[in-house]
Amino acid sequence: MSTSEPLRSTDRSRDAGARMKAAVLGAGVTGLVCAYRLSQAGHACDVYERWPGLGGQAATLDVGGGHLLERYYHHLFTSDRHIAALYEELGLPDELQWMPSSMAFFVDGRQWPFTTPLDLLRFGPLSPAARLRMGLAVLALQKRAREVGPFESITARAWIERRMGRAPWSKVWGPLLRGKFGERAEDISMAWLWSKLTLRRRLEGDEARQEQLGYPAHSWELLFDALRDAIVAAGGRVLVDRPAAALRRGAGGELMVEPGASGSFRRGHDPRAFPRDGAAERYDAVVATVPSDVFAGLLDDDLAAAVGSAYLGRLRAAEYHTALCLLLELDRQFSPYYWTNVADPELPFVGLVEHTNLIGPERYGGRRFLYVANYVEPGDPLLALDPDRLLQVYLPGLRRVRPDFSPHWIRARWLHREPAAQPIVTVGYHERIPPLQTGVPGLLLANTTQIYPEDRGTNYSVRLGTDAARAVLADVREGAAALRSGG
Ligand SMILES: Cc1cc2nc3c(=O)[nH]c(=O)nc-3n(C[C@H](O)[C@H](O)[C@H](O)COP(=O)(O)OP(=O)(O)OC[C@H]3O[C@@H](n4cnc5c(N)ncnc54)[C@H](O)[C@@H]3O)c2cc1C
């Protein structure tokens, strides 16, 4: 069962006998929701977070004047029902606001609007016949292809070239996938694109004419605060700037979390580099919501052996691309679109997300914000650049889109890098997904690599957090039953 609904009474039954003490590693959406669900079921939960704030990839920063903005551009789709239900459940029904979106492709030297079905018909980079064929193929997929199965063993490129022709791959889909997956674009499974086109973007009614996107009235931060408050009210702790540095088993087989020192985030992401701080704490269950490589780095030799080589192999098989995201405050509008897909491989970034074309600048006292989006392989030289040098690299590209663009328009800038931003979903991916249960009783992993076939997103992290809580309770119940029967 996979749902974000609160746990039912059977899930809540405490047949393990007592209130369980659980640790959740990571205060992103998955971790906070998991801890919230466990708290609702009557268990005490400690959340350990490496970063000095909540929200993980959806965390916000203060851009000044009391305004919070996500470090990485965020919006919701109308199909994101798990997170919408969570807002309702937390008593924040009016928080999500829905606005018309506008989208463009930058290709052949200009931005082509791509918001309405009519835009597709006018899309100059493809011949009229190719436009029609592409439109019909997408429609047929959305109407008829209800199951992911047939798309799991074929690459997106092979499927697109077969169903739409070569030009749509070389002008539209190839550059888009290269933007997210670099050299791996040719290997990306059609299952990934199927989910993007069917589950997320099946537009009905008015939305078929113009897509609506959601954004919270007070940024994503209010959701994190509400979840934290609920966890704390139930007797738990949410510890930020307090990472897990290691995981091991105690003398009685219980799980022990070794906390890392405050400021460890400055040492990067590998927990083996974090200085230890304070005594290890004992838990009945631990749910790690950290990336797969971080999880492997947390396990001591004994726990790694208990998890087993097959599971560790799945962790090692996880590949991610890094998000490199430059947020600019500009003194004027950059373009008329919220979202521009950059389908020109000569530009050194893959997207332009003009937040204040979705949420009016009046919300920010008239200020305007543009994200310059990129996904790169680990070790890409762009990752070593500071914001000013990156800006120099991006400047000619920004001028290709907006020829009169000047650095004088920039009032402020922020640069963020997220190593585990985008799991690389290749053919046969589903066979390599690590299960939630690691095989060690009470030790679970719940992270974005397990979100499938949908593309990762906060909505699915809400679902995953609930699934993880349910799996912990089942795990602990089974463990208690085994103990009772002497197993
Ligand atoms: C550029 C970009 C744009 C996106 N746009 C959207 C969007 O428009 N809409 C949308 O819904 N989603 C979007 N997403 C995706 C969404 O943000 C993520 O899928 C979601 O937030 C993942 O949540 P999570 O809790 O599973 O993982 P994370 O958010 O990665 O949380 C994991 C947490 O673990 C912490 N951690 C790591 N190591 C340790 C340790 N040793 N000890 C303790 N804690 C540790 C991390 O600091 C982090 O807080 C975007 C992501 C990116 C990068």
Image (cartoon, rainbow, N blue to C red):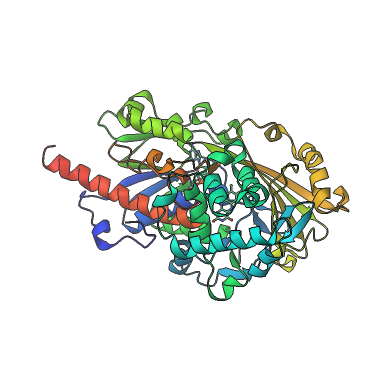
Q: Is residue 276 left or right of residue 431?
A: right
Q: Is residue 298 above or below residue 10?
A: above
Please state, as top left, top right, bottom left or bottom right, where the C terminus lies in the image. Answer: top left
Q: Residue furthest left?
A: 485
Q: Nearer the viewer, residue 321 or 465?
A: 321
Horizontal and vertical percent for residue 375?
Answer: 63, 42
Q: Is residue 404 left or right of residue 219?
A: right
Residue 204 appearing in the image: yes
Asked which quadrant contains residue 331, the reply is bottom right
Please state, as top left, top right, bottom left or bottom right, where the N terminus lies in the image. Answer: bottom left
Horizontal and vertical percent for residue 35?
Answer: 40, 51
Residue at horizontal 55 percent and vertical 36 percent from the top: 262
Horizontal and vertical percent for residue 448?
Answer: 47, 46
Q: Nearer the viewer, residue 364 or 352?
A: 352
Q: Is residue 138 left or right of residue 381?
A: left
Q: Nearer the viewer, residue 139 or 444?
A: 139
Q: Is residue 346 above or below residue 42?
A: above
Asked which quadrant contains residue 265, the reply is top right
Horizontal and vertical percent for residue 18?
Answer: 23, 50
Q: Residue furthest front?
A: 129
Q: Residue furthest top?
A: 301
Residue 236 appearing in the image: no
User: Number of numbered discs present?
Assistant: 0
Residue at horizontal 21 percent and vertical 42 percent from the top: 479
